[in-house]
C-alpha cells in the first residue's frame, strides 16, 4: 500500500479503540493492525462490573461493542499480526505477513502476551527462526523446515512452504519445544526427539512487544512510557496492558486517549 497513514495502531482491544476514536475526531488517517477479537484479554473476562457508563456484561459482549466502534472510526482495518516495526527517517514501516504499511507515528496497544517463548526462540530469531513463512520462506527453498503452531494460519503457511519446495515438518500441537544450533538454528527438539531443520517457523497469535520495535525500554514487564504515553522511541506511543500494571480496562481506555492526543501533537509539530 502506497498510503502513509498519520498513525498506525497495533492491537485491536480497548486501548486501540479509544485511541482510534480520538484520532478520528482529530481528523487523522488511521490504520489498525489487529488480530482476531477473541485474542484480546477482554474477550476472556467472564463479567465486567467496573466499567463506567455500561451495565455489567461479559467480556465477549463488550469486545463486540469495542470492535464495532473501532470499525466505525473509518480506520483502515488490517487483520493479522504485526511482525516488526522499522523506524525510518520520517516514518515507520510495519510488516504484516508479507505486506508492508507506512505511518508517521505508531501507537502500540498489543496487550500482554501470555504465550511463553520457547527456549532458543529469541536467541535464534532471524537466524533460523522466523515468524513469517511468506516473508522468509523463499530463503529455505528445497530445505527442511519446521512449522510450529496450530490453526488455520499455521496450516496455510505449511502448505505454502511445501508449495515452494520445502520439506515441512508440522508440529500443530502445543508442547515443549527447544531450538538449538550454532551460528544458526539447526535443530528442533520436541518430545525428546531432535529434528534437523534449516528453519523453524513459529506461528502464534502474538509477537512479544519486546520483539516488535527496536529501542523500546521495559520495566516490570511493561513498556516504559512517560505521562504522555511516549516510549523511548520518538513517534512511538504505547497504551493499555502493554505498558504494565494495573491491567484494567479503564486504564487501557484512558491511556489510549492520551496516546492518541500525544500522537496528534507529535504530528502537528512535525
Ligand atoms: C480473565 C480476565 C478478566 C478480566 N476482568 C477484568 C475486569 O473485570 N475489569 C477490568 O477493568 N479489567 C479486567 N481484565 C483486564 C482487561 O481485559 C484488560 O486490561 C484490557 O482488555 C486491556 O486492553 P488492551 O487494549 O490493552 O489489550 P487487549 O484487550 O489484550 O488487546 C490487545 C490486542 O492486540 C492484539 N495483538 C497483540 N500483538 C499483536 C500484533 N503483533 N499484531 C496485531 N495484533 C496484536 C492481541 O491479539 C489483542 O487482540 C480482565 C482480563 C482477563 C484476562
Image: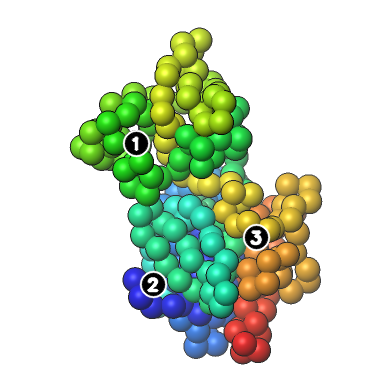
Eye-nearest disc, 1 or 2: 1
Find residue 155 and report its horizontal and vertical position in percent: 30, 35
Q: How many marks?
A: 3
Lower sequence index among marks 2 and 3: 2
For label 1, being within 8 Å of ligand 1 is answered no
> To which residue does mark 3 refer?
240
Q: Nearer the viewer, residue 72 or 88?
A: 88
For label 3, being within 8 Å of ligand 1 is answered yes
Eye-nearest disc, 2 or 3: 2
Q: Residues within 10 Å of mark 2 (few under 14, many from 20)?
A: some
Residue at image position (48%, 24%) is 186
Quick check: 141 left or right of 25? left
Lower sequence index among marks 1 and 3: 1
In the rendered view, tell whether residue 134 sits above or below residue 74. Answer: above
Lower sequence index among marks 1 and 2: 2
Find residue 105 and report its horizontal and vertical position in percent: 57, 74
> To which residue does mark 1 refer?
140
Residue 250 appears in view: no
Find residue 84 and report its horizontal and vertical position in percent: 51, 55
Question: Which SS class for mark 3?
Answer: helix
Question: Which SS class for mark 2?
Answer: strand
Residue 183 occupies which quadrant of the picture? top right
Q: Residues within 10 Å of mark 3 (few under 14, many from 20)?
A: many
Q: Which mark is residue 57?
A: none
> To which residue does mark 2 refer?
76
Q: Quadrant of the C terminus?
A: bottom right
Amino acid at each position: 500500500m502506497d498510503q502513509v497513514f498519520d498513525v498506525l495502531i497495533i492491537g485491536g482491544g480497548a486501548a486501540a479503540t479509544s485511541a482510534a476514536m480520538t484520532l478520528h475526531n482529530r481528523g487523522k488517517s488511521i490504520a489498525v493492525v489487529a488480530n482476531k477479537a477473541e485474542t484480546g484479554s477482554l474477550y476472556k473476562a467472564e463479567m465486567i462490573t467496573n466499567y463506567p457508563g455500561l451495565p455489567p456484561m461479559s467480556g465477549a459482549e463488550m469486545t463486540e461493542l469495542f470492535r464495532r466502534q473501532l470499525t466505525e472510526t473509518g480506520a483502515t482495518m488490517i487483520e493479522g499480526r504485526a511482525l516488526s516495526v522499522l523506524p525510518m527517517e520520517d516514518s515507520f514501516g510495519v510488516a504484516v505477513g508479507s505486506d508492508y504499511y507506512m505511518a508517521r507515528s505508531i501507537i502500540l496497544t498489543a496487550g500482554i502476551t501470555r504465550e511463553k517463548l520457547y527456549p532458543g526462540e529469541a536467541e535464534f530469531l532471524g537466524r533460523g527462526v522466523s515468524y513469517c513463512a511468506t516473508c522468509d520462506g523463499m530463503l529455505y527453498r528445497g530445505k527442511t523446515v519446521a512449522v510450529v503452531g496450530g490453526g488455520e494460519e499455521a496450516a496455510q503457511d505449511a502448505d505454502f512452504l511445501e508449495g515452494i519446495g520445502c520439506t515441512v515438518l508440522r508440529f500443530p500441537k502445543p508442547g515443549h519445544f527447544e531450538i538449538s544450533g550454532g551460528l544458526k538454528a539447526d535443530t528442533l527438539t520436541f518430545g525428546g526427539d531432535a529434528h534437523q531443520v534449516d528453519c523453524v517457523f513459529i506461528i502464534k497469535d502474538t509477537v512479544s512487544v519486546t520483539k516488535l520495535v527496536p529501542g523500546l525500554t521495559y520495566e516490570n514487564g511493561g513498556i516504559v512510557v512517560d505521562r504522555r504515553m511516549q516510549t523511548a522511541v520518538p513517534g512511538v506511543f504505547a497504551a493499555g496492558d502493554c505498558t504494565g500494571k494495573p491491567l484494567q480496562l479503564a486504564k487501557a481506555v484512558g491511556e489510549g486517549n492520551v496516546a492518541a492526543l500525544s500522537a496528534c501533537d507529535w504530528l502537528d509539530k512535525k
